[in-house]
Image (spheres, rainbow, N blue to C red):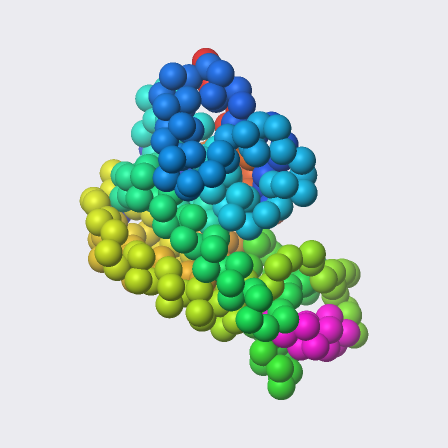
Amino acid sequence: MPSNNKTEIMKAFVFPGQGAQFPGMGEDLYNNSTEAKALFEKANSILGFNITKIMFEGSVDDLKETKVTQPAIFLHSVLLAKTIKNFAPDMVAGHSLGEFSALVANGTLTFEDGLRLVAKRAMAMQKACEIAPSTMAAIVGLTDDVVEEVCSSIDDVVVPANYNCPGQLVISGSVSGIDKACDLLTEKGAKRAIKLVVGGAFHSPFMEPAREELAAAIETTTFGNPICPVYQNVNAKPVNNPSVIKENLISQLTSPVKWTQIVQNMIADGATSFTEVGPGKVLQGLVKKVDRKMETTGVNSYQA
């Protein structure tokens, strides 16, 4: 378990989720690292399509396709971590999809198994989205308890999905339920209640078919002993036990991402810096909104 000794340097590494992708991502890794190039080629074989071509040459729309987006972000994050000199995290976490990257980074999953699970997750989520119309909305400027209370008061399925930072909570649910929630939350004083352009209601009961499909794949995958704890989405707590990590990962698709609580717990357990590994800077911003004095850095391109 992490130390509470605040004088000790404790490095937290965090990994982004869906939405951070960009055209050309990973090409610098492919061109400069022989290990990354070999793993990219292996990824093409595992996935059964040329993801490197889409990542390097595809458009924004090409990268939005679910079967591409999730493996692309996973590949970018995991291969970047491999280029960090003397990579030795004291704790790791990942936002939603990013939890799989974190589990490869801390040695719980092999690269190959992590990629297979991410590919299975992407396809299972896509299928779940097609079963029933559903969506998400970002609520800004209200406390979590007010948003939770409004969600529970609506007859339709509406639940908290992403606790991103204080004052920012994403909700998931049926289309009509989200419409009702946005109206009620605006009346309650939300600064913004924005419906998101997403395929469906991630981290909600609408993902139950995907959870069942992914659970079968997770159960048959070997999870090793990690080099450091992972703070998992479902409970925001540090976990070292491979069996417990499995259980929590299975629950992730239908449970909220407790990112605010993860960052708070990492800091309470002694984190002195946060390094975001992968595309974008979203997580660095969220960490700052939890504790503006916290040191944050990012690794989003090849490290020579």
Name the quarter where the C terminus is drawn: top left
- Whether residue 220 is visible: yes
Asked if residue 236 is among those painted magenta in the image, a careful observer would answer: no
- Judge by depth and name the residue closer to the eye, 43 or 104: 43
- Whether residue 266 is visible: no
- Seen in the picture, residue 298 relative to 143 is either above or below; the reply is above
Query: How many numbered tags mark residues here?
Result: 0
**Residue at the far bottom in the pictured view:** 155
User: For the point 41% across and 48% down, which residue is it?
Assistant: 118
- Seen in the picture, residue 285 relative to 172 is either above or below; the reply is above
User: For the point 45% across and 70% down, which residue is it?
Assistant: 208
- Seen in the picture, residue 62 relative to 300 is either above or below; the reply is below
Q: Is 198 placed left or right of 127 in the picture?
A: right
User: For the point 38% across and 42% down, which residue is it?
Assistant: 115
Q: Residue 196 is drawn in which quadrant?
A: bottom right
Residue 100 position in % (x across, y down): 39, 46
- Judge by depth and name the residue closer to the eye, 57 or 232: 57
- Judge by depth and name the residue closer to the eye, 242 or 283: 242
User: For the point 57% across and 54% down, which residue is it?
Assistant: 164
- Judge by depth and name the residue closer to the eye, 98 or 287: 98
Q: Which residues are magenta?
A: 173-184
Helix, strand or loop for the magenta stretch, by majority: helix
Residue 146 position in % (x across, y down): 64, 72
Q: Residue 161 is drawn in which quadrant?
A: bottom right
Residue 159 position in % (x across, y down): 56, 72
Q: Is 196 placed left or right of 43 in the picture?
A: right
